[in-house]
Image: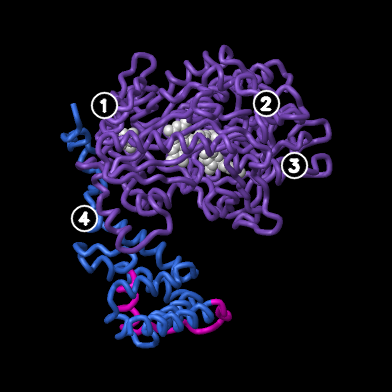
Amino acid sequence: MAMKRREFLRLNINLALLSLCGGVGAGEIAIPWSGNDKKTLADVLYQLFPHPRLNKDVYKQVTEQISHKIAQSNELASMMKNAMDGLTGNSREKWSMLPPRDKTELLEEIQHTPFFQFVLNETLSGVYRHPDTWKLLGFEGSSLEFGGYINRGFNDIDWLPE
Amino acid sequence: MTKFSLNDPSVVVVIGSGAGGGTLSNALSNNGINVVCLEAGKRLALEDIVTNEAEMFGKITWLDERQGKGVAPPPFPVWNCKTAGGTTMHWTATCERLLEHELNARSHYGDIKDTTLVDWPVTLDELEPFYAIAEDRLGVTGTNGITRLPGNNNYLVFEAGAKKLGYKDVNTGNLAINSSPRNGRGSCQQLGFCASGCAVGAKWSTLYTDIPEAEQSGHFELRTESMAVRLNHDNKGRVTGVDYLDKNRVRHTQSARAICIAGNVVETTRLLLNSQCKQFPNGLANHSGQVGKNYMRHVMAGVVGVMPGKVHLHRGAHQAGIIKDERPHNDKRGFFGGLLLETVNFTPESMARFLKPGSWGQAYAELLEKYDHMAALLIVGEDPPMSANSITLHPTRKDHYGLPVPIVHYEHHDNSRKMLRYGLDKGRQIYEALGAKQVIEMLDVFPATHNMGTARMGNDPRASVCNHWGQTHDLDNLFISDGSLFPTSGSANPTLTIIALALRQANYLTSRIQSNAI
Ligand SMILES: Cc1cc2nc3c(=O)[nH]c(=O)nc-3n(C[C@H](O)[C@H](O)[C@H](O)COP(=O)(O)OP(=O)(O)OC[C@H]3O[C@@H](n4cnc5c(N)ncnc54)[C@H](O)[C@@H]3O)c2cc1C
Ligand code: SF4
């Protein structure tokens, strides 16, 4: 059963890829965002760099940043719609119900497309530039205002062998 | 502030205000020679430097289009700066001298297939006095009685692992970073953002040393947001001036008595190639055909160890850690030349970008969550010159200045592959000796940070672009003043040698001007 469903989804991806190759003519109108697209995109971002303990707002904020860029480019907007249709088989609800493994598999199929690379790059900087992520990872961010680390543990390692 | 008019024929024009251009400008102007320094970037104040990598990247990095071929990363093959102070803003300040055998690579390593190995036309004896001046001026730790920096966590891991492997020559390195206040600059606060510009000025940069010193001489004008695009010459073998674009991309021509180019290799090459004309159909000063060839960037790769305890590698000076035991040439390792191991650090974003480029998904996110347990080092090794490694111009693509986009082509020599394998294994062993849970190799992921070789010095005008002063063979009053001059790379980070050569060139050029020979 599962196999069959994946095959079906894959077909959709291929369609999406096909349309991605088509490109967009100048002067076309950017496809307006639907709330569901944003939700799906936010979830895609999460699948790219899933940190379960990270505040979900981080992914929402990055989604907003990416949406903003997409809204300014007809080409990106069209790629985005195609990618979403491909990933979700025209039903955003279905995507949200897929188990993570299937989502990963579907994303793997489009990982070499320009749209995926755009999203990956934006998500990487958005997520790993975020102070909440820094906190999760143990990075302490800007240090100038605290006088650097010279008195704040720059050499506090305590587990090394004598 | 001193200003010179466009048609003032007395000025020496220096192109670029980084390590080479900043140093040269300062030395010349303090010898009483009038200097106009054209700098493509803006001038920042110390207050503009913040401890935020992404923000500084946008402020100081050279972001105009370039293309990488071979193993040079395609969209961003070279990492350098476009700002007053040049890449001395990004640099992490390791200052090693070249060694005798490295300056005589051809004699020591022999005739190696697929290389253009040569000996330098400059001896170590000739360079040493200038190295000494440079180390004093930069305040290099470990020289002139200057204490080395204390070791930070990333260093302490590196040192402990190195000792387990039996390495002896291990310390926090010779760095142009103040361990205590010196020459009007404060000391390192272990801010941990060296590659984003040092917000306290502890790390040497021409921005707040040579440039203001030159200005005090009364013989110097720094002209920022001025992009040199073409050099002009007469038919007597002399350059006469330089065309540049100001911030509104309006073209001006500055007359010149002599021109010194220190654009950091890629731009130096581009400027020469773009100045081609009937007399120099392959690019200015390129009768040898060697301009843009023999491009070197050091054999370079990274190793990250996921350690059993926390490291917090972000706390402290990036490159305050070096192992020199592998630097001597040693046939038994199966390759010629030597390598250094140096500490390095990454922010979460750069770790995510470089650890396994292009990776995503659960496993990668889990790996990145171990950020605070990571220790990191670089290997930096001697890179043999190869004719095919080159900087050329794109036949059709233009950047926003309307200049052809540079193409950076770089491949590894077989020797480099062996050295990489050897160095990566050593890096891995350093961390495994301390119980690393996982070790990741970063190979062919970094843009070049060291650039050398594309206008090599030599005694034979048919096989080199410049003589041993960095004066082009073809045009008497045209000089190259950056890493382009290096006939071979050695294993040392290049900047101290760029500075030593610039100081030496300044003496020569001064005497030529004073005796009216130029
Ligand atoms: C992250 C990083 C770390 C580094 N760490 C070290 C280290 O530890 N040790 C070491 O030895 N080296 C290090 N380096 C390398 C070091 O920064 C360079 O070797 C050095 O800055 C080169 O000096 P330069 O004068 O040739 O060029 P730059 O310092 O790059 O200066 C060139 C200047 O010329 C300007 N310019 C270029 N073209 C034009 C034009 N056409 N018109 C006008 N202006 C122009 C540029 O804007 C720039 O300001 C590092 C580099 C990086 C990126
Ligand atoms: S670690 Fe030291 S040198 Fe590096 S940025 Fe901070 S104060 Fe400057």
Question: Which of the two marks, 1 or 3, is nearer to us in this view?
Answer: 1
Instruction: Classify residue B37 by image quadrant.
Output: top right
Q: Where does the image place residue B117, in percent across and percent down from the top left?
A: 65, 28
Q: What residue does disc 3 label?
A: B283
Query: Which residue sits at x=30%, y=59%?
Result: B365
Q: Chain of mark 2?
A: B
Question: Which of the two marks, 4 or 3, is nearer to us in this view?
Answer: 4
Seen in the picture, residue B248 relative to A143 is either above or below; the reply is below
Q: Nearer the N terminus, badge 2 or badge 1?
A: 2
- What amino acid type should be assigned to the residue bearing mark 1? Pro
Label 2 secondary element: loop
Q: Residues within 10 Å of mark 2 (few under 14, many from 20)?
A: few
Name the disc covering residue A136, or none.
4
Q: Chain of mark 1?
A: B
Q: What residue does disc 1 label?
A: B150
Q: Nearer the N terminus, badge 1 or badge 3?
A: 1
Q: Chain of mark 3?
A: B
Seen in the picture, residue B313 relative to B470 is either above or below; the reply is below
Q: Is residue B21 magenta?
A: no
Instruction: Say left or right for B20 vs B116.
Output: left
Q: Is residue A43 magenta?
A: yes
Label 4 secondary element: helix
Q: What residue does disc 2 label?
A: B111
Specify start and end residues of the magenta stretch as a single range.
A21-45
